[in-house]
Amino acid sequence: MRPESPPLRPLRPQQVPGSPEPPGGPWDLRPCGAPPGLCGPCQPDRCSLPGGCRAGLVPDSCSCCLECGNLEGQPCDPGNRSVFYGLCGSGLRCQAGGGGEDEEEECVCEEQEPVCGSDGRTYMNMCQLREAVFSTPELHTAGRGPCRTVPVIKVPPRSQVNGSGSSLIFLCEVFAFPMAMVEWTKEGRDVVLPGDDPHISVQSRGGPLKFELSSWLQIEGAETGDSGTYRCTARNDLGAASASAVLGVLGAGETGV
């Protein structure tokens, strides 16, 4: 008589190195890749490797297969297990926003210092550079800190038409490193505004982003004589950039049509 074979012991599931054991222990019989509570024995040979992951790969909800990590700014699951939103990708951590305790967690880059890319562009952190490398594989870090660059007008002033007596504002946003100085001029006048004109004022402050400067030209009680072309000029020791806008001030009874 053929001797009876001993009962087969189930094999321990293969897990992603360093990942926690699936809920319910290694013998929890649930299909791989399902939400927690529905995972089964891990069968890595049945896992399909995802593509197009700009933030790298992370363990799935069963800690068996790999899936795309969440990008900077995307919602995420805190801890080391994917439950609903998923885990943050490489170089990112999941933390609550600054709006209060009830605010949803999101992925935040662990390295917040800007870096200069080999393409001459400044990336606000390493995570943004890694994302760009996905579509431009030859891209690499040229140096820590922002790229030295001539000023770039990110938001130019916009032309507008207003009635006499109205108040109006021109906005000019500039990116530059080293930081730029911004001046306002009016075509046909050699003076830098506001000059000695009491109804014109200029204000500037840093922002809205790092290495940016926002400047406003404000005209209170506009008159028809204020019509003309206004120019925003930004300068640093590497060069200058400018942008202009046209102002039309209508007199009483004019419609601008």
Image: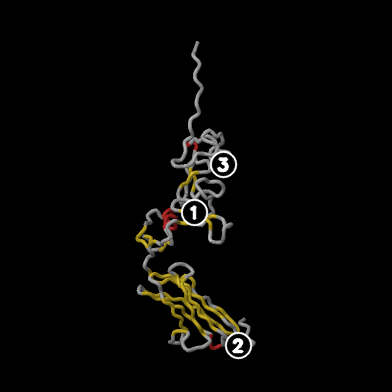
Residue under the image location 47 percent in, 80 percent down: 231
In the foreground, 230 or 90: 90
> Given the image, on which type of amino acid does mark 2 rest?
Gly
Q: CA distance from mark 2 to mark 1?
A: 53 Å
Percent coordinates x, y for residue 148 in the rendering? 36, 67
Residue under the image location 51 percent in, 43 percent down: 60
Q: Nearer the viewer, mark 3 or mark 1?
A: 3
In the foreground, 159 or 209: 209
> Given the image, on which type of amino acid does mark 3 rest?
Pro
- State the SS at label 3: loop
Q: On screen, 82 above or below 150? A: above
Q: CA distance from mark 3 to mark 2?
A: 70 Å
Label 2 crowding class (10 Å Cα cut-off): few <14, some 14-19, many 20+? some
Please say if the residues under marks 3 and 1 sit with CB atoms less than 8 Å apart.
Answer: no
Say which label, 3 or 2, has the lower sequence index: 3
> Given the image, on which type of amino acid does mark 1 rest?
Leu
Label 3 crowding class (10 Å Cα cut-off): few <14, some 14-19, many 20+? many
Q: Nearer the viewer, mark 2 or mark 1?
A: 1
User: Number of numbered discs present?
Assistant: 3
Q: Which mark is residue 36?
A: 3
Q: Where's the C terminus, which quadrant?
A: bottom right
- State the SS at label 2: loop
Q: Which residue is mark 2?
A: 251
Q: Which residue is mark 1?
A: 71
Percent coordinates x, y for residue 96 in the rendering? 53, 56
